[in-house]
Amino acid sequence: MRKLRVGFIGCGGIAAAHANRLSKFGEIDLVAFSDVQVEKAKEFASRYGGNAYDSWSVMLDKENLDAVFICLPPFAHENEVEVAAEKGVHIYIEKPISINLDLARRMVKAVEKHGVKSQVGYQLRFSFAGERAKKLIEEGVLGSISLVSGAYWCRFIRTDWWIDRSRSGGQIVEQATHLYDLLRWLCGDVKSVYAEMGRLVYHDVKGMTIEDTSGVVLRFKSGAIGVVSSSIGAVPDQWWIRWGIIGNNATLESEAIDSLRVYYSSRKPLIFETLREVGRDPQLLAERDFIEAVLYDKDTRIPIVEGLKTLELTLAAVEAAERKKPVYLE
């Protein structure tokens, strides 16, 4: 079998995580790396082989790539997706796919026009809790869903582009987006959103324009109500991604990505079970899903249009908080 020739646009921390895993895939050759700080690209090339570039456009022109991993911060996206798609290069792109909706929509159009595979890095869709919940919902175990809750709590701050809303989009858009995407995947699209947010923890961080605390109310198209809270001022060294879903026949509760508790609330006496799978690597599964889609002409679980829909939702939450009134999605 011919190996896939893979390149990277952006050589930061998330790119390093992807490259480390991909280097162990027998179906892949890592052949090219680009970063505006070319020394970073050279470090990757030294470790994995291939060529280093200070320009992604030059890399795409010179290299005969099958796929590219786009690992740029939100503000740094240009037309790299459109150029790659036009060249027939399949695309794995980190979340959020942009903070500019017009650009994000052009990305989707380019991918669909040229028929390339795409995957967005929302790996919670490959978590054990997420996958098992999806199966239970699709099998009708929950019945109709009435309430959805979620919490993305951590203690996290960095003083680069991340704290500048014009460059990152803020915590909801850049970080808690993982949880919003998972809940949208499980419970369907959202038709309206209302939000409150503020800087209530980090008062003295110079240049900080993002929220550190938020509460968001969602109305799903199904009629279900959702409530999601996010904080970067919670427990040190803890990343809580917790959620619950109430259906008229059963309730789901997840306190970690590798566990799910199912309460069969329509049964008497009450029956519940705790399901768990230890050792799963959701990011690896997302990468594997993408590579197999390219090799065997299959659909990916998270095509770029899903990244657009989640971006529309999270940006709507920010808009609702700024306008102090609900925002309606199409």
Image (spheres, grey):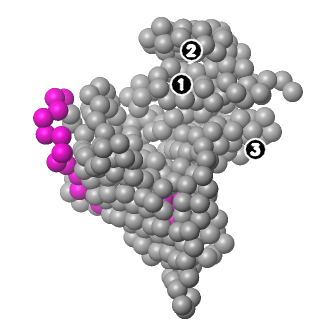
The question of residue 195 being in magenta is answered with yes
Mark 1 vs 3, N-terminal side: 1
Secondary structure beneath dot 2 equals: helix
The question of residue 241 being in magenta is answered with no
Estimate the spatial distance between the alpha carbons at disc 1 and disc 3, rounded to whole Å.
26 Å
Q: Position of residue 157 (x, y in %)?
A: 28, 35
Q: Position of residue 192 (x, y in %)?
A: 37, 62
Under mark 3, the amino acid is Lys
Image quadrant occupied by the C terminus: bottom left
Under mark 2, the amino acid is Phe
Query: Dots 1 and 2: beta carbons under 8 Å?
Result: yes
Give the residue at the far left of this rendering. Answer: 204
Q: Which mark is residue 111?
A: none
Tell me if I can see residue 223 in this picture.
no
The magenta stretch spans which residues?
183-207
Q: Which residue is mark 3?
A: 298
Q: Which residue is mark 1?
A: 16
Q: Quick one: label 2, few (<14), some, or many (20+) residues within 10 Å?
A: many
